[in-house]
Image (cartoon, rainbow, N blue to C red):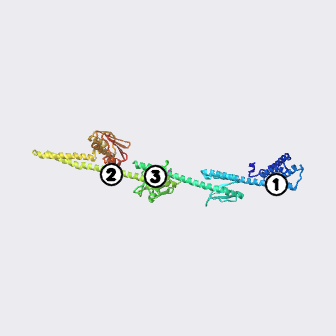
Amino acid sequence: MALLLLRPKPPPLALGLMAAVILIAAETALLFPLKAGVAEGARSVVYLCGVMVVSTLWGAGLGVVTSVVSALAYNYFHVPPYWTLHLNARRDMQSIVVFIAAGLLTSFLADLARSRAAEASQRQQEADLAAELAHRMLRAGDLRSVLGPASQRIAEVFALRSAAIELGAVPGDERRAALPLYDRATCLGTLLVPADLPEPTLERLRRRVVPSLESLLFAEFGREAITNSLKASREEATRLMEEQAAMRRVATLVAHGAAPIEVFGAVTRELCRICGPQNTGLVRYEPDGTGTLVSGRNEADIAQMPAGTSILLEGDCVSGIVKRTGRSARVSYDKAVGPTAATLRELGIRSGVGVPVVVGGRLWGAALASTTSPTPIPAAAEARLVDFTELVATAIANADSRTQLTASRARVVAAADDARRRLERDLHDGAQQRLISLGLRLRSVEAAMPPGLDTIREEVALAANGLTGVCEDLREISRGIHPAILSEGGLGPALKTLARRSAIPVELTLGIDRRLPERAEVTAYFIVSEALANAAKHAQATVVCVDAEACDGLLELSIRDNGIGGVDTGNGSGLIGLQDRTEALGGQMEVVSPVGSGTALLFSIPIDGI
């Protein structure tokens, strides 16, 4: 009964007529047993029950009919004389008026309850719709993907032919009415519904749906903005961490003394990793107005330009434009002119970008990125190239300075060796020869003296012996400056000579079967000579083991003694000079000298390309 009462629409009229007939018949039948014990006026109240039921469920119209028929049935069956219809104007009209009044009041109350129930049902539907829309829209990864289902759900709830939610301002037309969705003065979207909707439905949509959609769109746009901001922040943080990690890798190479070509190669690898799958390169500007490709990294299907390639900076090439302007540059090589642009076009390069590498306020070179794709390099990749180049500029400068320092030290050592050689030659060909000549002349004078001049002969002999001693001393000095045996026989015989002349017994092991570059031989000779002298002076050793082996492009020297150990290279010892001479050739020195366990000097000297 309650469900029937709260239905938004009354049951069918035919069912109401049947119910009215059944109720009147049941009430009439019920009153027959009550005639004897119930007063006549009280019996008529039974018919009010049917009137109220019909008025409640089917409204005032059928309730009035039921009231009139109930009054007639009561008069016919239960008012004497029975089974005849005899109406009394006062009595029967009073009953009819009471029945009709009761039916109307019941119908009014039922309609009011029904309207309140319908309104509550609408509110529940609207609340459920708002919750469903919020669930769909706020949980969706893409707002546009849920606008269609959300529109369909609105159409179902409000019994509309169609509905659509569009982002932005969309005007209405003769078929569709537009309900704009605003956040203050900003139009977030538009709800489109059929233009022929009744005004109450449109008003209901404006009051119940539009505010919810406005709030949901505002929240969704805010969520998207926050999500995009967080995503951008996360990507920026990831990019910064990648750049810092790349910078640390490059700086570690520089700190470990890696060769410049290795450092430059690491820079181009990191540039490729940061900028994406692009061709990357590092160009150093030379004083003669050209550039040198110090390192490059190309895609697998592109011919690699070797490191050391000279690059002409004329025309429309990125490195030339960066050189001339001192700023970042972007070039499309499809119609670019110039020799370098033509070469790159032949290699399949379509476009490129370059950023300056500035060190200490000086334009050192340029970092380049290029692509074979017709799509230019994205601006974001160019920005990453700029940022990373600023980070690695110091590392590049340090590596380049290390190269220049190594070359400078090598030139100083070479110049010193040349000076030693000239001095040794001058001593041998000049002063030493003159002393030998004077000694021979004195011996001739001594031999030609007549008898009786013994005192003078002894003086002359003493002078000749002195000159011979001076020649021996000069020869020793000459050997220390630049041993002739090193130039004549190579490192092996020279080391054997040092071992024979050492004050401490030397166990010599040689693994050298060929002549080595002169600079390597001279460096190794003086290393062994200085090490043996230091062992004789300070080590208190009884034996020194010297091993020399040339293999795989390196000369490995090992000089070990069984002395007291405890050598400190930072305390002004002669080992600093050995380290400088070794590093001037790009080599390395290692000292192992625990106290009381002797000293081991380990040298690794490159012999290829020096």
The number of numbered badges drawn on the structure is: 3
Res 538 visible = yes
Location of residue 205 with respect to 481 vertically, above or below: below
What kind of element bears circle 1?
A: helix
Q: Mark 3 or mark 1, which is nearer to you? A: 1
Q: Which residues are magenta?
A: 238-247
Res 306 visible = no
Q: Point out the tag, 3 or 1, that comes first from the N-terminus.
A: 1
What kind of element bears circle 2?
A: helix
What kind of element bears circle 3?
A: strand
Q: Mark 1 or mark 2, which is nearer to you? A: 1
Q: Which mark, by number, is residue 281? A: 3
Q: Quadrant of residue 193?
A: bottom right
Residue labelled with disc 2:
412
Q: Which mark, by number, is residue 98? A: 1
Residue 567 image position (x, y, % from top left)? 32, 44
Gap between marks 3 and 1, in whole Å? 105 Å
